[in-house]
Image: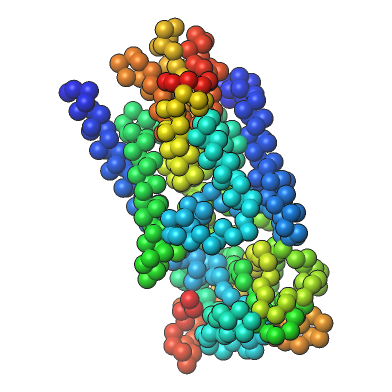
Amino acid sequence: MKFWSALKRHKWRYLAIIAGFALFVYPSALLIRAGYFLQGSTAMPDLHKTCFRMPFDWIASGNFATFDGRFVLIGFLGAVLGTSFLFGPLFCGWLCPVGSSTELLSKPMPNKFKINLSRKLNPSALRYGFLGAFVLVSVLAAFAPSLGLASICCRYCASSQLQNLVNGIFSPGALSYWHSGGIMVIGGWLLIGGVFWQGGRGWCLYGCPLGAVSNGLHTIGSKLGFTYKVKHDGSNCTQCGKCEQVCPSWAIYRNEDVVKINRSTCTACLECLKVCDSNCYSYKRGKV
Amino acid sequence: MTLKKIFTKRILYSFAGAVVLSGLIFGSSVYAKNTLNPTELSHFFVPFPAGRVVRPMTVDNPITGGSIFVRPITINVDQRGILKRIFNPGVEGLSTHWLDNIDTKPHRIGLKFTNVNFEVRWDINAGIPWNEETRTFDVAIGPGERVPDLGVDWLFFFPPEIRAQDVWYDGSLIVYDADTNETLTTIPIKFQKSTAPATSEGRPKSSY
C-alpha cells in the first residue's frame, strides 16, 4: 500500500525513472543508440556503454586519450555534472536506472528488515572517503601497474549486472552465466545496498563516483544564490519526521528539532516536498 | 556528552566506515579480477593472421607499429572462484574485444570452434554487421584495423557427464578468411581440472 501511495504521490518522478530506463537500458537505450547511429556503428546499445565510473578512472589516471571520439559519453557527463551544479543531482534522483531500480525494489520491503545507519554514520564522510579511495586506486592502477589494479572498477560494475537482469526479462538465457564478481555485485548492490537498505540507495551513496562528484558540485553550487536547491522553512514544521522517512539518500536529519538538508547526499528527488503536509519544503533559487 | 563531541565521534566512525567499505569493495574486486581473468571469463587478443599459436608470443601489427600478445588458452576450472563453483558451475565463458588484422591486406573473417560436442552460445556485438548463421562478418577488416565496438562472449555449457571428466574441452578457436576459406589463426583452447594429466609444460594451470 505504501509502495503504491509513494508512486501516486510523485508520479512525474516515476515517469522520469521510466524515461531513464528508455534512455539508457537495452532494448531501447535511446541515448546510446543515437550515439551509435551518428557514428554509423551497428553495435548493440546497452547501459554498459554509458559507464558511470570509467571516465573518473580515466581522469584520475591521466588517461585522457580514451575520451577521443566518445562524444555521447562526454556530452552525458557534461550534462550530468552541469545540471548538478545548477539544479542539484537531477540525474541521480530522476533518471539513473541503477539507483532508481534498487530504490523501487526496496519500497515494498518492511522497514524492520532494512539497514539504517543514518543516525550512526555521517553519509558525507563515508561517501567522500570512498571517492578518495576510488581515486587512489585509479592512480595506483595507472602509475604502479605491477599492483595489478587496472580495470578493477569493472569488477564491481552494477550497470552491467542491471543490464544482465533486464536482458533476462526478454531472453532468460541471458541469466545463464554468472562469474564470482557478478554474484558479489548482485549481493552488494541489489540486495545489501538496495532491497535491504533504508531508501534503497546504499550503492549510490557509497559506491558511485559519479554520484559523489555530482553531489560535491551541488554542495558548492547550493551556496550560490542563482542555483536551485531544496529548501526547508521550519516555521510550519510539525516535527512529524515523514520527510526523514521518505528521503532515499539519508539527506534529511534533525539537529535539536531543526531540520537540516545534507547537500552531499541530496539528489533533488523532491520526495520530501511531496510528502510534507505543512508545505515546509520548496525547490527554488536563492541563498539557503 | 556535548553535541560537538557527538558529531566528532560520528565523523570519526564514518571515516573508519569509509576505510572498511573501501577495503571491502576493492578487496572483493581484486578477488573478482583474480578469478575472472584467468579462469571465469578469460579475455584474450585475437590477431590474424597469426598461424597456430602454440605458446604465448607477441606479434607485430606492421601498419600501426604496435604489438599484440596472443596465447593458447588453458582454463583450470578448479581455480575458479568459490561463488562461481557454488552458484554457476556448469557454464564457462571466454571473451574478446580485440580482433585485429595484422596483415597488409583486408580480410572478411569468420570464426569457428573445433571439437565441440556440447552447446556453445555465441554472444557477439560489433560495430560492423555480423552474420549469426554463417558466423562471419559481412564486411572486411582493413589492414592494421580492429573490429570496432566489439564485445564477444562465448558461453560453454558443459553437461554433468563432461564435467565428471578431467578434461572438459580440448579444441581450438579458428579465425579464417570467409572469402578464401584460408585459416588465418588457430588458438588452442582447453578447459580442464587440476587432476588432468600433466603435459611437458607441467601440471595443469590457467594461462594468463
Closer to the camera, A233 or A70?
A: A70
Question: Is residue A27 left or right of B193 when viewed as pictured?
Answer: right
Residue drawn at x 75%, y 66% is B128
Q: Tell me what residue is drawn at x 49 percent, y 16 percent.
A: A281
Image spot of residue A78 (x, y percent): 56, 44
Specify the quadrant of the image occupied by residue B49.
bottom right
Q: Is residue B58 visible?
A: yes
Q: Is residue A49 above or below residue B169?
A: above
Identified at 64% across, 50% down, the residue is A72
Q: How many marks?
A: 0
Q: Estimate the x, y position of residue A51 in percent, counting from the top left.
A: 56, 51
Q: Is residue A143 left or right of residue A166?
A: left
Residue name at image x 31 percent, y 31 percent:
A120
Left or right, residue A12 beside residue A277 = right
Query: x, y percentage for residue A182?
Result: 52, 55
- The x, y position of residue A66, in whole percent, is 55, 61
Q: Is residue A35 above or below residue B14?
A: below
